[in-house]
Image (tube, coloured by chain):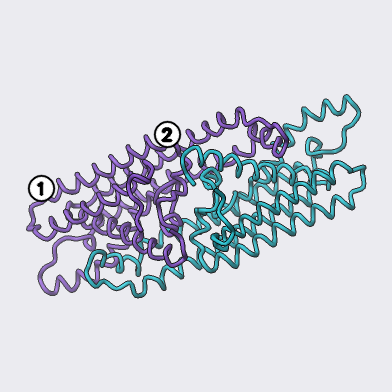
Chain colours: A purple, B cyan
Amino acid sequence: MASSSAQLDQPHLCFQSWIAQQQADLEELLQALTIYKGDDTHLNLIVEKNIQHFQEYTEKRSILARENATSFFAPSWCTSLENSFLWIAGCRPSLAIRLVYSLCGSELEAQLNEFLQGVRKGNLGELSARQLSLVNDLQCRTIREEEKLSTQMASLQEDIADQPLLTKANEYGLIGASIEHVDTTLDEHALALAGILEEADKLRLSTLKELINILTPLQAADLLVAAKKLHLSIHEWGKRRDRHHGRP
Amino acid sequence: MASSSAQLDQPHLCFQSWIAQQQADLEELLQALTIYKGDDTHLNLIVEKNIQHFQEYTEKRSILARENATSFFAPSWCTSLENSFLWIAGCRPSLAIRLVYSLCGSELEAQLNEFLQGVRKGNLGELSARQLSLVNDLQCRTIREEEKLSTQMASLQEDIADQPLLTKANEYGLIGASIEHVDTTLDEHALALAGILEEADKLRLSTLKELINILTPLQAADLLVAAKKLHLSIHEWGKRRDRHHGRP
């Protein structure tokens, strides 16, 4: 039985409405692509709106994470499958770029068929040399930024083995051991985590924005369709697999 | 209300018994340290037994992970606080080394007091120059190994944006879209995750073993006491904070 919304906490609701938003955006994108006849203005608007929705989602997350950041790092509202792809509370920013390369490859074959049938129309299988060079440059920069954030995350995780938590942990099992100061320190840790989550979300957003700028509106729409279908599919596959393994 | 064991799945039970094992081991270590009068044989046996228990835990995890690896990467049986410290389904292997450095520093002060009172007894505040150099060397090697595994993990996570899942995801929303082949691919992904988890556990274990070999039995017992108190404390603090945030 599905949980009623009233039982869900804010981060869970935020994620649920993001899934619903992506479903709505996917439908709109697919419709725009169906009626596309070479006029980029309408497609551009839809693509911009999609990015705007992603930005709004990250802004909501950022506010919620300041309340309780730790829950975003292994969210109970995501499936185990989704969680196994987590990097700082979301997907790797470079995943969007990897997706472009994959689509570029997989569309080459489809494109050949279309070309032979005379309906070739400038999709991701047709990235120009200049576009490929820009994507490649973006990938290098994104991976460097990911590495910086990974290092910050590692350093934050190592702080747990440091003062003042070590002194408080030393009181483990002692009768009357106070938990004073522990919460202050853990609140500071959670705030630092929220900060890293915000930086990671900024990188996810800026990478996607920059990628969209490199692509034509048609290619950008193709990418967004593929990204949304992939996320929504993984969410569905994950739910089915969790049920199979007896996870609620 | 605590869940009854009958309701819990195998990985959850495995973790629960590991927590109970650590509590028992901690008590035994503390008792051995209380009666310690300079004879290392007994202390050595207890330390060895502790390492053996950790090894047995990783072996059990490894078998369970082959059944359902994804659940170990954001375990529902751990608290949000614990999960925010996860690196490949456990703590960072280098955390044990960081703990030695922290204890080394924090015990220096305590040791000065003991020294003045004539009860100085060779704890972690008294690492020799040779020991420090060996620990430093181990830290460099461990971090390099961590980086290798992080890269493998990133590469595995990126495979999601590749064939054959991309083709299956493209069928999202289509009536009659088959889920054939998806499970085979996701099973392969889960097995690869289980493999990385096993490698990470091996690194956690070998780092701890090597560290124990560098230390005297008394120092090793000190380290194990601190590591267990820290883990058990974080588990307790995490439970309290999850209850506070309304997480069951």
Residue A97, quarter of picture: bottom left
> Residue B53 location, x and y as percent?
72, 58
> Residue A156 location, x and y as percent?
54, 38
Q: Chain of mark 1?
A: A
Q: Residues within 10 Å of mark 1 (few under 14, many from 20)?
A: few
Tell me which residue sits at (60%, 54%) in the image.
B145
Q: Chain of mark 2?
A: A
- Locate residue B203 relative to residue A131 in the image: left or right: right
Are discs 2 and 1 located on one and the same chain?
Answer: yes
Type of amino acid under label 1:
Thr
- Locate residue A176 relative to residue B4 in the image: left or right: right
Q: Could you tell me which secondary element the residue under label 1 belongs to?
A: helix
Q: Which residue is mark 2?
A: A66
Q: Nearer the viewer, residue B206 or B113?
A: B113
Q: Nearer the viewer, residue B22 or A214?
A: B22
Type of amino acid under label 2:
Arg
